[in-house]
């Protein structure tokens, strides 16, 4: 990902990610490392500006593009690793959770923090967390909007490994891909999809309902007010 300053996910960036995933699949890619050009941020999650006073059709397109990108990422036939050498809140955490393996560096925060922002992580975000860390830990983390530090993320199983820095993180991600290289492709892909199928189907069969929930939620005046205040707090921080 290379969308400075924080790889926030707007419609255009989501389309780029989706196109890249389609191309990798068409080219029979043998593995992907999802990484960031930023030295300190993996991805800041959804671009909050896409949810602030949007036009209805633009907001619908944004959400559908996110769904398209995620459905592709979660179901890739090739192995995927997230090299998390920077913070990964909310949608950034979703990207990492959607890969098959996660390597993180020290001093990083990762989690589905939506509750803390006064918004709600959609069901499929929650499913991804549950599938990685289990029901009990996911429920606790989601209710609190907890951001895990590196040590906590390793302890709870949100990530698989800690590496010292970006170079080591990429090296460990490559080692994971190498460990998968000799597995028969069809068997590997079939098992992966078997595990992920119910999560994928839940969104695929309820896409329109999911979009409606998003639209109705973000167009509420009190949610818009919350987004406005959050945007102000973010830009004050950097100002
Ligand atoms: C009943 C059922 C209801 C269902 C509801 C359905 C849907 C609701 C939607 C729910 C889904 C939400 C998922 C999300 O992903 S929401 C996004 C959450 N993301 C965050 O909270 C992250 C916010 N950012 C940060 O914490 C930090 O920026 C950082 C990532 C830790 C990086 O810190 P730092 O390096 O210090 O950078 P700055 O903070 O100074 O930021 C630089 C610059 O970037 C702007 N920015 C940061 N994050 C975002 C963002 N997510 N979107 C847009 N812009 C962002 C920030 O404002 C600065 O901009 P300026 O330099 O112009 O001030």
Image: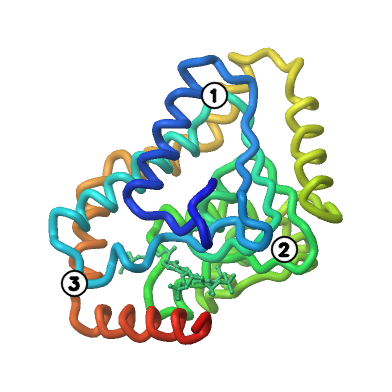
Q: Dot 1 corresponds to which residue?
A: 77
Q: How far apart, in angstroms, are the residues tagged by discs 3 and 2?
A: 33 Å
Location of residue 228 with respect to 69 vertically, above or below: below
Q: Furthest-front residue in view?
A: 239
Name the disc covering residue 232, or none. none
Q: CA distance from mark 3 to mark 1?
A: 37 Å
**Horizontal and vertical percent position of residue 101:** 69, 42
Residue 24 in the figure: left or right of residue 175: left
Estimate how packed mark 1 is, as few (under 14), some (14 to 19) or many (20 or more) residues with alpha carbons within 10 Å. Answer: many
In this rendering, the count of numbered labels is 3
User: Which circle, 3 or 2, is nearer the viewer?
Assistant: 3
Residue with the most extreme left position: 56
Q: Residue 66 location in percent, x, y?
A: 36, 48
Residue 226 placement (x, y as % from top left)? 32, 83
- Mark 3 and mark 1 in contact? Answer it, CB < 8 Å: no
The mark nearer the N terminus, 3 or 2, is 2
Residue, disc 3: 219
Query: Where does the image place residue 125, in percent across and percent down from the top left?
Result: 46, 56
Identify the residue under disc 2: 153
Question: How many neighbours does mark 2 have within 10 angstroms: few (below 14), some (14-19), or many (20 or more)?
Answer: many
Q: Is residue 237 above or below residue 181?
A: below
């Amino acid at each position: 990902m290379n969308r400075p300053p924080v790889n926030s996910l707007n419609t255009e960036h989501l389309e780029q990610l989706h196109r890249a995933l389609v191309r990798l699949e068409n080219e029979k890619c043998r593995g992907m490392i999802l990484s960031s050009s930023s030295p300190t941020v993996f991805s800041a999650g959804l671009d909050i500006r896409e949810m602030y006073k949007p036009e209805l059709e633009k907001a619908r397109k944004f959400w559908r593009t996110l769904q398209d990108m995620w459905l592709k990422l979660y179901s890739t036939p090739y192995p995927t690793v997230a090299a998390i050498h920077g913070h990964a809140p909310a949608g950034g955490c979703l990207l990492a959770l959607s890969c098959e393996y996660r390597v993180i560096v020290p001093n990083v925060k990762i989690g589905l923090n939506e509750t803390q922002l006064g918004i709600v992580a959609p069901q499929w975000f929650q499913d991804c967390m549950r599938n990685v860390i289990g029901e009990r830990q996911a429920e606790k983390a989601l209710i609190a909007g907890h951001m895990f530090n590196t040590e906590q993320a390793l302890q709870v199983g949100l990530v698989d490994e800690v590496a010292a820095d970006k170079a080591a993180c990429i090296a460990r991600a490559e080692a994971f891909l190498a460990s998968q290289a000799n597995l028969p492709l069809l068997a590997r892909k079939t098992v992966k999809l078997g595990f992920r199928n119910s999560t994928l189907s839940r969104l695929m069969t309820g896409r329109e309902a999911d979009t409606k929930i998003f639209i109705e939620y973000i167009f509420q005046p009190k949610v818009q007010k919350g987004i406005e205040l959050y945007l102000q707090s973010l830009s004050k921080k950097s100002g």
